[in-house]
Amino acid sequence: MTQQPFTLPDFYQPYPARLNPNLEGARTHTKAWARDMGMLEGSGIWDSHDLDDHDYALLCAYTHPEASAQALDLVTDWYVWVFFFDDHFLDVFKRTQDTRGAETYLERLRMFMPPHGAVTEEPTNPVEKGLKELWERTVPAMSADWRARFVHSTRALLEESLWELANINAGRVSNPIEYIEMRRKVGGAPWSANLVEYATAAEIPARVAHSRPLRVLKDTFADGVHLRNDLFSYERETQREGELANCVLVLERFLGYGPQQAAEKTNEILTSRLQQFEHAVLTELDPLFTEHGLDPAERLRVLRYAQGLQDWQAGGHEWHMRSSRYMNSEVRPAGRFTLGGPMGIGTAAARLRSLSSSVRVRHYDLSPFRKVGPLQVPDLYMPYRSRQNPHLESARRGVVDWSRAMGFFDVVPRPATPAVKAPSVWTERMLTGYDFAVCAGALNPDGTEDELALGTQWLSWGTYGDDWFPQLYGPTGDLGGARATVARLKTFMPLDLVSAGVPRNPLERGLADLWPRTVAPMGAGHRAQFRETVDVMLDSWVWELQNQHERRIPDPVDYIEMRRRTFGSDLTMSLSRFRTGRQVPAEVYETRPVQNLEAAASDYACFVNDLFSYQKEIEFEGELHNMVLVVEHFLDISREQAALVVRDLMTARMRQFERIVAVELPALYEHLRLPAAARAGIDTYVRQLQDWMSGIVRWHEDSDRYDESTLLRAEGAPPAATVRIPTAPKGFARAR
């Protein structure tokens, strides 16, 4: 027997697997179905023995233990289809590296899952035939909203296979951040989450389907499924199939680990994501129910859906332990899991077992304001030169006058506490020192005087809100009041530009002034998109406040994805898109290359700030939202080592940015047959992102804002030992 490349780690398994009593019926049904679809003998991919050995009916019986016989049959057929697709795509396109043929093949599959109406195309192979038959059996029972979400996740599952194929062709192993995000799309777990809604008869109410709590449940579920699969499939994928999309391999390459250490660290990420799922269920769902006014039946559907995802995790692990498809010979289970102990959402504490040291995850920091001293920022890879707007001095003068008019220097009533000694959130001297015009000028070096003035005022408003918000709610941890404040702020962004009311404080006054001046020239679609970018930034303030109140160090994946929101990346990128004019079709911005371009740029800029602001945030503000701190705790390394890891992540993201510009965007232009004007618009947008990243680096390098001496003599700030106010959320694409 060939020795396994590593010993499987101890898995975090707080929930027992359960088996659906309709298993044998599903086995019989799906074998006949697969034969009817042409997936067995004669397909060149599988025969009957392959299907028996893989036992997808067992997978579905474990992952959907409460599904009816009819629902289990249908779900099992879907999984047989998706695994057949995966093996067929590997054999026909990945091994032959036939990218052009793969694109044509995937394009045809869209015809067999129309968002509206019936399938009219005739299938020409088992994959198309199976998809047509399954689509027609599934969609009549579900709403139009579910159908749209299922189409989106199915297309991602199919079409992002091209990302894997492109990496195989280039011999490229992705960076860790890129891998986690792309694995969700190509790995299929979001698609599985949609089927959980079907199998549990618990369709998510449309008005909360895209909310943060439901997104976290889906994403943590997906990451858990995929990382678990990576551990079990490492041997088959890397040694027999030539696959490069596996987290164990990604960490081997990025961190310089051996297979065993990389497997242990992959398992720690898996554990952290499962615990993030639990945290979201216990802390984020109830406020969501209240905010959106879900009735008892709707709340129950969401909870049934969450338990369905929980069942999938437990059952999926058991199936991986039993299936001949995976590396599990050294850890065969002794027998079937049986029910035992309390079940359902909220009962995890009764069943949690102690984790071994290999899967410990550190979530909490109960020693804020610890003295850390200055952090030596490593040399950063920045291939672009920064530029500055010629209207800088005008913007500098104007933002001070505008901020004064909005009341940013006025005393703002807030809870009395000895820790708050400054008479106002800001003073004019503080604002002058922040010099937001330099940031705005670097972000938009070619902008007009009016554009620069507006951009500088947005930076002032966003940063003022970041400072004001936690001073008001941090000492009390009043999350309800914080959510109410955010909800009221959103009323000052009417899409029809009809005034929503009278501002009560400087933050509302500033937004009420900026909003109409910014969005009046925009079309309705872009106006709505821009509104959403401000919404997500405001919501992220509450997320940071909750973590700060709990003293909870964020899960690494959740931190990176939320950091883009707290930094205001989407907002500033949206303004840049608007400046490219209407020559770029909106759907181009939804493509994988452009979205990955934006994410890479955003992460680079966010991590710049985290490196430079480490001492300020950890020692002077008691902050937990810093990538150096997150890496320090998660990898259990020193802050100096963590800074190097963050630097390496930045370099990897910048290299990815460069590769997208050089390789993926030209291919996208040809694939979409974009006209010259649209290509020029995207090229302009790329230059704007380059200006954005280089300008942020330049500002941090030139500023003394983070020098220890500056922090100690900061106007109105008491000594670090007496400060006990949670820091502001890091917002709006600026250095803190």
Image: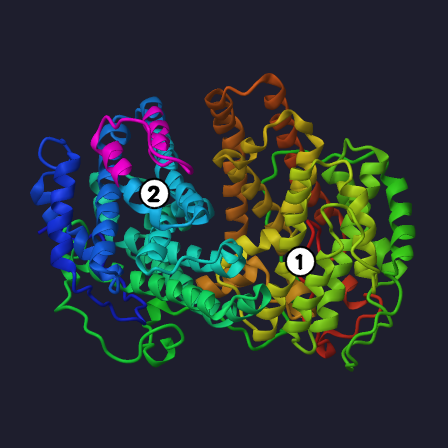
* Residue 55 left/right relative to 516: left
The spot of residue 180 in percent (x, y) is 42, 49
Q: Quadrant of residue 360?
A: bottom left
Q: Is residue 123 magenta?
A: yes
Badge 2 local density, few (<14 within 10 Å), some, or many (20+)?
many
Taking depth in this image into account, of 395 and 139 the one nearest to the observer is 139
Residue at 82% x, 55% y is 510
Q: Nearer the viewer, residue 114 or 94?
A: 114
Let me know if residue 238 appears in the view: no
**Label 2 residue SS:** loop
Looking at the image, is mark 1 or mark 2 earlier in the sequence? Answer: 2
**Count of numbered circles in the view:** 2
Find residue 329 and report its image quarter.
bottom left
Q: What range of the chain is rendered magenta?
A: 104-133
User: Residue sitting at 36 percent across and 75 percent down?
Assistant: 348
Q: Which residue is mark 2?
A: 245
Q: Residue at x 17, y 49 (%)?
A: 325
Vertical comparison of 219 with 310: above or below: above
Work out which quarter of the rendered image holds the C terminus and state it.
Answer: bottom right
Instruction: Determine whether the residue tagged by mark 1 lies in a helix, strand or loop.
Output: helix
What residue appears at the point 45 percent right and 44 percent down from the top-left corner?
A: 178
Q: Nearer the viewer, mark 1 or mark 2?
A: 1
Mark 1 neighbour class, 10 Å CA radius: few under 14, some 14 to 19, many 20 or more: many
Residue to which mark 1 is pinned: 538
Which amino acid does the dot numbered 1 rest on?
Answer: Leu
User: Is residue 501 in sight in this rendering?
Assistant: yes
The amino acid marked with disc number 2 is: Ala
**Residue 680 percent coordinates (x, y):** 63, 22
Q: Position of residue 244 (x, y in %)?
A: 32, 40
The answer to whether residue 531 is above or below residue 67 is above
How far apart marks 1 and 2 lie (CA) works out to 35 Å
Q: Is residue 102 left or right of residue 701?
A: left
